[in-house]
Image: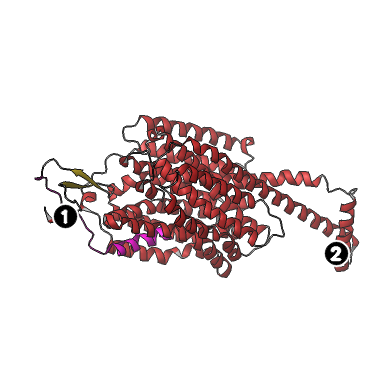
Amino acid sequence: MSKALTKGGAGANPTRATQRADGQVATRTGQAATAVAPKVWTPSFSPWLIAAAVMLATFMEVLDTSVANVALPHIAGNLSATPEEATWVLTSYLVSNAIILPATNWLSRYFGRKRFLIVCIIIFTLSSALCGAAASLGMLIVARILQGAGGGALQPIAQAVLMESFPPEKRGSAMAVFGMGIVVAPIIGPTLGGWITDNYTWRWIFYINVPIGIIAVLMANTFIEDPPYIKDQKPGRIDYIGFGLMAVGLATLQLVLDKGQEEDWFHSSLITLAVVFAVATIIAFIIWELRAKEPIVNLRILTNRNFAVGTMLMTIMGIVLYGTIALLPLFLQTMLGYPAVQSGMAVSPRGIGSIISMIIIGRLVGRIDSRYLIMFGFSVLAFSTYLFSDINLQISMGSIVWPSIISGLAMGFVFVPLTTAAMGTLANEQMGNASGVFNLMRNTGGSIGIAAMTTLLARGAQVHQAALASHLNPYNPMVQQRMQQMQGAMATQSGSAVTATQQAMGMMYGMLTKQAMVLSYIDNFRLLAFLCVLCIPATLLFKRVKARKAAAAAMH
């Protein structure tokens, strides 16, 4: 038996190890002992140095998705934008991030994985500097779009590099480190973003990426190398038409969601035309991808029942996850007056719950039917989201922290078994495309969730304000009593009865608008909880599958 064969872990039977483009090793039993196994490629540097290089870039990208949430009120105030407009900072990033995901594999083969990774880090770093220097909301949104395009490819490339750099027996440890980085970044993000915003300015949450990005580029250039089979690969043809239709369709849809409330929806000809164009473009994209020989997004994979159900549930999961993440910091800062750092500390414990659930779920997947784990996860998520609806203007931080921890616990019980159930009936060669579709729909659901929640927040506040105002009349004894108390307090300060009356009426109206907004927040949290409840029976549509390592890895 040859040394190369022994190194490949062939065992007693003659085998032939064939390196594939995705970094996995496919082993086939040879018919003759004369089959010659090619030498297994190993990187020049320690795999852990390579892991540090790719994880630094990935950690920076994941951190940036959560670090901006707590700074939104500050961004809105500094750039003279409404809270609804400020959320474009989040949604524009998610959309561009989602659009670039399906093209990552082709671009890696075309430019070379190492070169493409370095270019992505450079784009992300330079666009972060542009975000920090933005003088207007429009400039910030354009910079965030570029940032999302650069960051979209970092996670899948990092995962592929890790899988190739480590020997098979150590890939589990590598992916555990990778997963831990993905989970820890959202814990640190809100608190770090709040501290930077309070002590310096919101611009530094983007500027801080510049030195990290430079270090990541130097490390990637030094330690990462393309395997021989990557260098020899031909990129093939890219589906330019499909990619263009997808990008234009998703971008137009996001324009509708972000501008709809501002333009009063279908009372605006711009929104009406944009909806028609978005629907037509997305339909054309679906038809084209189903007929193309080499589609950029293979939609035929959705004929697999488990994957179709899993993708639908992951989209709803994106709506609930990102919708909640957008609402909580906004409520804490605008309604309760929390500084950004305290707002971040209140929502960060969600990550602690996720870490705990990841440890538990790792022991349960494969032993318990994934469908039951998913149902349990959505049940707990519905309960924790409903707890957020028990809010008022006098709640303590604990009323946000504990539901956040419970919500984090639920996330682990949803993400891991959901990915296992969705990917469990797919062939290995379908995993790459499936992972792209899965992440695409998660990000799309997230952008829809953020836009929908901010729109419903504004609309709901108007409805509740009209309802509350009907009780605010001079003939209501309670209103008269409250007005007299306020007028008395104001008269001692202003010395004028007319001024005191005007000030008292202004205070009364301010209290009314605040209460209307709180009621709107409550409605939104209850709606998200209801979406989670709908997912519980939908889980029964899955066929029963066993856990697969490839599927579990694809969740990232």
Q: Which percent across, then down, holds residue 158?
A: 35, 55
In the depicted structure, whether residue 260 falls above or below residue 226 = above
The residue that appears at 87% across and 58% down in the rendered structure is 501
Q: Quadrant of residue 32?
A: top left
Residue sitting farthest toward the left: 34
Residue 490, label in figure = 2
Q: Amino acid at mark 1?
A: Thr
Residue 6, label in figure = 1
Q: Which percent across, then down, holds residue 194?
A: 56, 64
Q: Quadrant of residue 491?
A: bottom right
Task: Answer yes or no: is residue 126 visible.
Answer: no
Q: Which percent across, then down, holds residue 307?
A: 42, 38
Q: Earlier in the sequence, mark 1 or mark 2?
A: 1
Q: Is residue 47 magenta?
A: yes
Q: Which percent across, then down, holds residue 397?
A: 64, 62
Could you tell whether 288 is left or right of 108 in the image?
right
Task: Give whichever of 7, 66 is nearer the camera.
Answer: 7
| Residue count near mark 1 (Cα–Cα under 10 Å), binned few <14, some 14–19, many ≥20 | some
Q: Which residue range is magenta in the image?
A: 33-59
Residue sitting farthest toward the bottom: 199
Q: Is residue 398 magenta?
A: no
| Residue count near mark 2 (Cα–Cα under 10 Å), binned few <14, some 14–19, many ≥20 | some
Using the numbered discs, state the Cα–Cα distance from disc 1 to disc 2 in whole angstroms: 88 Å
The residue that appears at 22% across and 50% down in the rendered structure is 231
Residue sitting farthest toward the front: 367
**Badge 1 vs badge 2, beta-carbon distance below 8 Å:** no
Q: Amino acid at mark 2?
A: Met
Q: Nearer the viewer, mark 1 or mark 2?
A: 1
Q: Quadrant of residue 449?
A: top right
Q: Secondary structure at mark 2?
A: helix
